[in-house]
């Protein structure tokens, strides 16, 4: 199985970590906040803490990073209908400490269970800012298990097979 990750820095050879493809923010995939216009030539991630703002922008973006991890049934059903993905950043767990880390794990666990219950697609990514923040696919799987995924669900959420169509769509343009 081929695995992917999304990171915030560029590095020559991510295959050492076990990834077939690593998408670099600002190069392969772009992050947008509310009110920003997106470039239609590349995959895009909309980030916000407000589910209502995400609902307004559903047709413009490919992935949705709900930073608050609040469960919103309206957003989930519309994402499922449009075949879009939530982004779950395990970097939120990796780069926090103490009570904040415990709270993030609890919120992510609730969010992932919600997504699974309503059959909404999501992906896991580290969004690492440097070389030391990158985790191997196996480590990402284990973190996925900590937040309530089965091993198979965790593997599939980082598999290139799951999101390959989205990235191929843009590379053909």
Image (cartoon, helix red, strand yellow):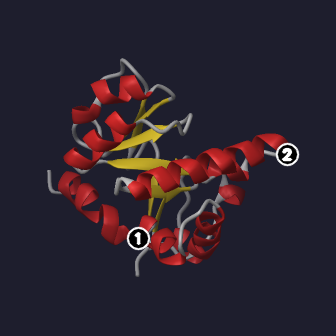
Q: Distance between the residues labelled 2 and 1?
A: 30 Å
Tag 1 or tag 2, which sits nearer the N-term?
2
- State whether residue 15 is above or below residue 37: below
**Going by the image, does 68 lie left or right of 38?**
right
Please provide percent x and percent y for residue 29: 38, 46
Taking the spot 36% from the left edge, 17% from the top edge, the residue there is 35
Give 42 or 72, whichever is nearer the viewer.
72
Vertical placement of 75 versus 36: above or below?
below
Which residue shows up at 36% across the image and 29% down it? Answer: 54
Between 64 and 23, the residue placed more toward the observer is: 64
Residue 129 visible within the image? no
Task: Return the mark for residue 159.
Answer: 1
Q: Which residue is drawn at 64% across and 71% down?
A: 142
Relative side of 166 to 65, left or right:
left
Percent across and percent down for residue 56 are 29, 24
The circle drawn on residue 127 is none
- The residue that label 2 is drawn on is 98
- Evaluate whether residue 13 shows in this view: yes
Residue at disc 1, secondary structure? loop
Q: Which of 67 and 10 is in front in this view?
A: 67
Element assignment for label 2: helix
Local crowd size for mark 1, using a 10 Å CA cut-off: few (<14), some (14–19), many (≥20): many
Q: Which residue is drawn at 60% across and 76% down?
A: 138
Outermost residue to the left: 173
Question: Quick one: label 2, few (<14), some, or many (20+) residues within 10 Å?
Answer: few
Q: Where is 104 relative to 31, above or below?
A: below
Q: In which quarter of the image is residue 32?
A: top left
Location of residue 82 with respect to 67 vertically, above or below: below
User: Where does the N terminus fall, quadrant-wise?
Assistant: bottom left
């Amino acid at each position: 199985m081929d695995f992917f990750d999304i990171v915030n820095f560029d590095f020559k050879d991510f295959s050492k970590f076990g990834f077939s493809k690593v998408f670099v923010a600002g190069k392969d995939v772009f992050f947008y906040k509310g009110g920003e216009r997106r470039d239609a030539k590349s995959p895009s991630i909309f980030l916000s803490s407000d589910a209502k703002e995400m609902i307004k922008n559903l047709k413009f973006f490919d992935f949705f990073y709900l930073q608050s991890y609040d469960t919103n049934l309206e957003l989930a059903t519309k994402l499922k209908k449009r075949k879009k993905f939530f982004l779950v950043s395990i970097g939120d767990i990796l780069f926090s400490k103490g009570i904040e880390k415990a709270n993030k794990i609890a919120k992510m666990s609730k969010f992932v269970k919600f997504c699974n219950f309503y059959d909404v697609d999501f992906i896991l990514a580290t969004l690492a800012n440097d070389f030391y923040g990158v985790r191997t696919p196996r480590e990402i799987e284990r973190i996925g298990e900590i937040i309530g995924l089965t091993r198979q669900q965790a593997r599939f959420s980082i598999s290139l097979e799951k999101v390959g169509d989205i990235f191929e769509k843009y590379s053909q343009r």
